[in-house]
Amino acid sequence: MTTGKLRIALITETYPPEVNGVALTLGKAVEELQARGHRVQLIRPRQADELPQEGLVTALPLFFYPQVKLGWACPTAIGRCLQAWGSEVVHIATEGPLGYAALLAAKKLNLPVVTSFHTNFDQYFSLYGIPSLRYLVLLYLRHFHNATRQTLVPSQGTLERLHQQGFLRLQQWGRGVDTQRFHPQWRDAQIRQQLGLGANDLLLLYVGRLAREKNLPPLLAAFRKLSKDYPKAMLVLVGDGPLRGEINQSAQERIHCAGLQRGMDLARWYASADLFCFPSCSETFGNVVLEAQASALPIIAYDCPGVSEQVQDGVHGRLLPRGSDWDRPLHALCANPADRQRFGTAGRLRAESQSWTRSFDILEAVYQRQTPPR
C-alpha cells in the first residue's frame, strides 16, 4: 500500500549493529520504507565507534543493566531536528528519556505520533531486585503510549495484556523472517567438528541475551542432567549479557558460550543445531523462535505469550507449562529424532508464510493513516 511518500522520523534507543529483536526489526523497517520511497530520519544514541552527527545523541547506560543504553537529548533539540527534516509522522520505538523528549517535542509541533511496544520493562524490575518500581513503570508506560495516536504491539497476547491494563489504541504489528538467510541448507559440519560433535551427536542451541529475564536456569539444569545419558551432547548459548561470565565460570565442559553472532555466522549456528531451546517467559514476540523455525529446528519452550503464538505444541515442538521442569520433555525430544524432524519440517513450512513484506505493509498503512491526504 502506497498513497504518498512520507517523511518519517524514527526515534529509538537501539539500532543495528546492536543485536536484539528490536534493533533487527527497526533496521529492516528503515530499509524497506526507504526502498518504497519514504524518507526516514533517525534519532538514536551515538554508538561507541561513531562520530557526532545530526540525529545522534548522548548514550547513557541503564543503571541496573549497563548493557542497555538510553539516549539523552532535550525536547528543544529534537524539535529542531523534526522541523529541519520536515517530519510528517513521528514513530517512537522506545520509551526511555529519549523517547519521552521526542514525545514532548512532537506534541509541541502538533505532529502525529505512533509508538511501538517491544519490551516488558515493567516485568524486568522484579527480576533485578527492585519490584517496588514495577507498578510505577507500568503507570509510566501506559501514560507514555496513551498520549499517542497508535501503539503497535508485536503479538496478540501482548495486545490483550496491555488492553487489560488500560492501554488504548492498540494494533498488532507482527514480524517476519528472512527464509533465504535462515535455512537448513547452511548446516556446517565444521562448526560441529570444532565442538567435538559427530554426525549423530546432539547440538542444543539457545539464541538471545544472557540475562535474568531470559530465564536460563531451567535449561542449564536440565542439560546437566541430560548429559548423564548423552555425554557427547553440547549446549551452545549464542548471545551476550550480564550472565555470560557467571555461566562461563560455572558451566561444565559441554556448555559453550559462542558470543554475539551476526548475519550468515548466526544462520550457520541455527542450521547446525538439532534442537532450539528457549526458556524465556518475558517475550512480546521472540524473533529468534521464528529464525529457528526457518532453519527447520524443533522448538522446546514455555507456553507464554508471544512464543505460544508461534509454536503449536505437538506440531512445531513442545510447549511446557510455565514454571515446569525441563528434564523429561527435553530428554524425550533428544531421544526421538523422528519427532525432531517432524517438528522442524512443520516449523520451516510455517516460517515460509511469515513474510516481512506483510509486516511492513501494516506499518506503512499506520503511517499513512496519520497524515492528511495530499
Image (spheres, rainbow, N blue to C red):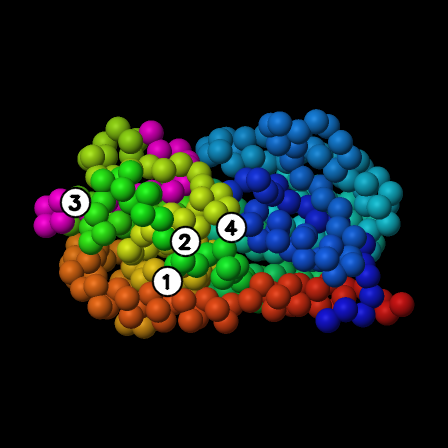
On screen, residue 224 versus residue 74, left or right, reads left
Q: Which residues are magenta?
A: 228-245
Q: Nearer the viewer, residue 329 or 275?
A: 275
On screen, residue 259 versus residue 147, left or right, reads left
State the SS at label 3. Answer: loop
Mark 4 or mark 2, whichever is nearer to me: 2
Which residue lies at the image location 29% right of the left edge and 31% below the top edge? 248
The CA distance from mark 4 to mark 3 is 32 Å
Mark 1 or mark 4, whichever is nearer to me: 1
Which residue lies at the image location 21% right of the left edge and 63% below the top edge? 337
Q: Residue tagged by mark 2?
A: 186
Number of residues whose C-alpha sits closer than 10 Å to that of mark 3, classed few (under 14), some (14–19) or many (20 or more):
some
On screen, residue 133 versus residue 320, left or right, reads right
Number of residues whose C-alpha sits closer than 10 Å to that of mark 2, classed few (under 14), some (14–19) or many (20 or more):
some
Residue 22 visible within the image: yes
Which three-letter amino acid code belongs to the residue tagged 2?
Trp
Residue 364: which disc? none
Which three-letter amino acid code belongs to the residue tagged 3?
Lys
Assess whether mark 2 and mark 1 are in contact (beta carbons under 8 angstroms).
no
Residue 47 image point, x, y percent: 62, 32
